[in-house]
Amino acid sequence: MNTIFGIPTPALYGQVLIGLINGSFYAMLSLGLAVIFGLLRVINFAHGAQYMLGAFAAYLLLNWLGINYWVALVLAPLVVGAVAVVIERTMLSRLYGVDHLYGLLLTFGLALIFEGAFRHWFGAAGQPYAAPSQLTGGVNLGFMFLPIYRGWVVVASLVVCIGTWLLIEKTRLGAYLRAATENATLVQAFGVNVPLLLTLTYGLGAALAAFAGVLAAPIYQVSPLMGSNLIIIVFAVVVVGGMGSILGAIVTGYVLGVLEGLTKVFYPEASSIVIFVIMAIVLLVRPAGLFGREE
Amino acid sequence: MAVGTEYIAEQPKLSTSSMVLGAIAIAALVAAPFFFYPVLVMSILCFALFACAFNLLIGYVGLLSFGHAAFFGGAAYFTAHAAKVWGWEPLSAILLGAAGAAVMGLIMGFLAIRRQGIYFAMITLALSQMFAFICLQVPFTHGEDGIQGVPRGHLLGILDLNQPLAMYYVTLAIFLFGFFAIWRIVHSPFGNILKAIRENERRAISLGYRVNRYKLGAFVMSAALAGLAGGTKAIVFQFATLTDVAWQMSGEVILMTLLGGIGTLIGPVIGAGLVIALQKYLAASNFPVTVLIGIIFVICVLLFRRGIVGEILEFTKRKPKGAA
């Protein structure tokens, strides 16, 4: 059997794949956080809860209404995005004038409400959600065995990340968004409806989280607590990448996911803390983050 | 950072009315174990001290730490280990816990003060989560079981803390010591510089203050006092578990402070009392505690950001103005 540094290669590739999948979720979630933060200046603590809501929406659509995975992949982000729009209109928009920390505290409270309610209704244990039949099974790539669903997650997340990046960098809407990030008052003076832009941005960010949640449902079990533990890691990813750049958030997400996977191979005890350690090192060397600007 | 500004009594001397109120409050606390279940009051005192320590940072320096559970729970582990495995006398075990928390505060603070505002909150949260993962893995914390059956022992080898009243008065003494220490810090020249940093960091820098040293100093003090509370809790409840280091605990202490009033001396105490009493009350019912905590968070942030004590102070301040 082939080995690299004394590790059998199939195990190595397997962990790199798991790292790539975790990295896909880090990338999608930190992307959403960065988009929301860029315009609203709010750190959306409810992002993990919205990811969890996306997974639960898929689970409930299947079990209550018999709606399949593919429809859920579209419907769940729409539902969660709509909830987020209501939250932004009724609550978050009242806090733009005060210290940004209150936005963090509000979304923290909302995350607790969502998680507490779902744990009350469904219990803390995970619910299984089967992958769609088209994506079950796997292919032998010669050097490793690739489960099709996992390959699909990596591809889908890449498409979503690149799509969001293109939307922000290349379209007119994206140009408004970037302009409002730089100077909202001026953009409003040009006749752009900035409050609407803020609402849509929050809805889009939440929809991204929900999309990630649906993707995650067949891999991890659908559980009320799936979001909260993930979101803290994503915060560390965001600190490492710096929130100044959309592309930076995406790249950092994938790279840290793979590094975490590699740590599982070479020094498993440290795999749960490696991202935090990297965050500490980055803070020492480059406090603004790898892609960030000093503010 | 305009969190909880302008509600602080700036006078360095105590006014007569606050002296009278303070004396009544202390008398009430001395009498409390005869009217309430002592363990409940001790629990409130520990969390009140924890919230006051947290408030030292958010209220007087404007730094929102989302990782204070690491100091509270970390100190609980250190104290429990010293008392149970090494057989230390309880007071020295508690002080060891506070010292351990101070060292952790030095490390975490050193990293976290490199960023400001929202990043500061995220970094402290991430670092405390890292500490929680470490606590889950290292052998001395006993993983999911935690350290159980911690002996209360004899204070200074004399006073038997297994008697509820003795334990209560020791806890009260530690709380009053911590509260007084915070009062002294806030009203010292050092505290004034902290407030200056909160109000306008750049101006404080331009006046020649090494802002980061003051921030780090305040962070370490806050961590040590949170550790004092955590160590005391470990002796009172005779266990230390992962619950104390989890991020939910950091959230709870934020809620206590926010509810009572950020930047007020007495607010965190009242907030802690209310939250602990609510949890106790809800434990008997079927309603999920987490949801209620979330709802209180949302209501506080949207409707009264000054907290209960802050709103009362604001109301009494406004009244004479209207009369004049």
Image: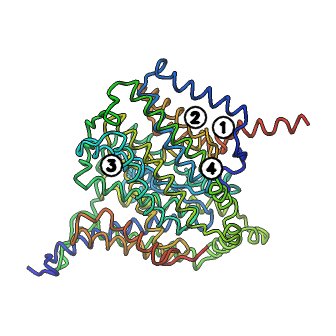
Q: Residue furthest left?
A: A1
Question: Vertical placement of A2 versus A261: above or below?
Answer: below
Do badges 1 and 4 share one subunit?
yes
Q: Nearer the viewer, mark 3 or mark 1?
A: 3
Q: Amino acid at mark 4?
A: Val
Residue type for callout 2: Ile
Q: Distance of mark 3 from mark 1, alpha carbons?
A: 34 Å
**Residue tagged 3:** B78
The quarter in which the C terminus of chain B is drawn is top right
Question: Which of marks 2 and 4 precedes in the sequence?
Answer: 4
Would residue B123 be found to the left or right of residue B14 on screen?
A: left
Relative to B138, does residue A251 appear above or below in the rendering?
A: below
Q: Can you identify the residue that label 1 sits on?
A: B309
* Residue annotated with mark 2: B270
Q: Are marks 4 and 2 in contact (CB under 8 Å)?
A: no
Task: Give the CA separation, mark 3 to mark 4.
Answer: 28 Å
> Which of pointers 3 and 2 lies earlier in the amino acid sequence?
3
Work out whether B241 lies above or below B135: above
Type of residue at label 1? Answer: Val
Q: Residues within 10 Å of mark 3 (few under 14, many from 20)?
A: many
Q: Nearer the viewer, mark 4 or mark 2?
A: 4
- Which element is circle 1 on? helix
Q: Which mark is residue B186?
A: 4
